Amino acid sequence: MLPLKKRVIAAALIITGLNSEVSLAQNTKFLTLNEAVELCLQNNKQLKLNKVKVEAATASTVEARERRLPDLTGSANYIRLTKPTIGGPLGNTVSPDINEAAYAIVSGSIPLFTGFRTKNGIESSRYLEEATKLDAENDKDAIIQNTVAAYSNLFKAQSTVLIVRENLKQAELRTADFTNLEKNGVIARNDLLRVQLQQSNVQLALMDAESNQRLANLNMNIMLGLDENTLLQLDSTSFVEINDARTFSEFEQVALTNRHDLAALKYREQSASAGIRMAKADYYPSLKITGGYFAANIPHLFSISNAWNAGLGLSYNVASVWKTGAKVKSAKVRLAEVKASQDLMNDRVKMEVAQAFEGYVLSKKKIEVYAQALEQATENNRITKSKYRNNLVTTTDLLDAFVQQLLANLDYANSKADAVVAYRRLLQTSGVANNEPKNNY
């Protein structure tokens, strides 16, 4: 059996497992789990980046729609001329006195037919925009889960400190009792040393637990965008028992219907299909309505005004006959890649839901087992104390009973928080982490 120090320290390290710089907490803030989730969603840097990505995707869709609008260009020029000398078969002639010229051209066109390129370009951009939004929602679900896990880690770290601190008080009282017994010659000096060693080990365990609590507190402050010196007081009622009777098959169907990453791949598939149609558009000619206006003025020679024109413009790139095939093939490869990703994602989702469901069921069972273990350890410690007073057990048996009750308290306190994290993980893998009622946090 491991010494008390190593066993308690190992439990505390497994509970927290956080790596940050130590900060002394000064300000105090009471924080519920719901409030922690809301703060994290408000301040998370990844979500802010995702917002920019969504705005960029929306701008691309707007840009694609604007390709249906008319094109209108205009130019105006003013030219200064030297007096030319004109020669030829007729000999030198007197030229008009021209030293300047000005002209302006305005032209416009409206696309009538572009081989469906514009229509499919809009569809492709719109589908990619929706996929980007779903990617952001998927990240949001993951961030909620990370917040719940961090909140649970801090809660367990705080629980560890409270339990170890309480047991240190008991160890100190036991040391005082044994000191008096040793002075009166009731017990051997060796028994007192064992009790004193146990008190020292509990003190060391408390120091490690308090250090891990500070690290967990700092990690939570950074996640939530709070001042690093804020001391967080957590709400123990956030880890109420959850009863969800849905089966694995039900959660699996929920996931296949609601997972944001699966839905994003469906939109990317539609975008890739539109990309194939865009590539094929090069096989077709383009037809436009054209129009324009021209005006010119050359003093002493002529002037033009009200020169309007309108017509139809037809264009076709003959090279597209042998160049477009490669574009279409490339677009079809992208579609095949997306479909292959969908198959992989379906399998991954099923496995993730299965693992999360098993973790949730196991966490529920652990609560029951740890509750029984706590009752047993408490009763065993009581009986061992009674036997020790009657010289029926050794000091080692007494200290072992104390350790068992300490660890049973830790395990039971942490199992309730672990069950909430496991349930939230199940909701996340099912794609409904942000849709469930908040009282299920």
Image: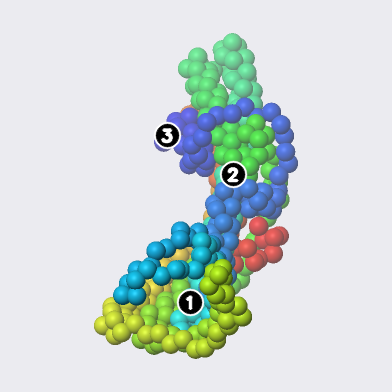
Do the residues bearing badges 2 and 1 touch, measured as CB atoms within 8 Å? no
Foreground mark, 2 or 3? 2
Left or right of 278 on screen, residue 197: right
Farthest residue toward the top? Answer: 183
Q: Residue at x 52, y 25 (%)?
A: 204
Secondary structure at badge 3 equals loop
- Other residues around mark 2 within 10 Å, as few (<14) / some (14–19) / many (≥20): many
Q: Looking at the image, is 255 positioned above or below residue 140?
A: below
Q: Position of residue 93 (x, y in %)?
A: 41, 70
Q: Residue at x 62, y 27 (%)?
A: 24
| Quadrant in which the C terminus appears | bottom right
Q: Position of residue 169 (x, y in %)?
A: 64, 26
Q: Looking at the image, is 283 positioned above or below residue 268?
A: below
Find the distance from the CA under tag 2 to the CA under tag 1: 40 Å
Q: Position of residue 276 (x, y in %)?
A: 39, 80
Left or right of 392 on screen, residue 31: right
Reading the image, the residue beneath label 3 is 2
Do the residues bearing badges 1 and 3 touch, measured as CB atoms within 8 Å? no
Whether residue 155 appears in this view of the structure is no
Q: Residue at x 57, y 77 (%)?
A: 304
Question: Identity of the amino acid at label 2?
Answer: Met
Question: Identity of the amino acid at label 3?
Answer: Leu
Q: How is the image coloured?
A: rainbow
Foreground mark, 1 or 3? 1
Q: Say which label, 1 or 3, has the lower sequence index.
A: 3
Find the distance from the CA under tag 2 to the CA under tag 3: 36 Å
Reading the image, the residue beneath label 2 is 223
Name the mark on residue 121. Answer: 1
- Other residues around mark 3 within 10 Å, as few (<14) / some (14–19) / many (≥20): few
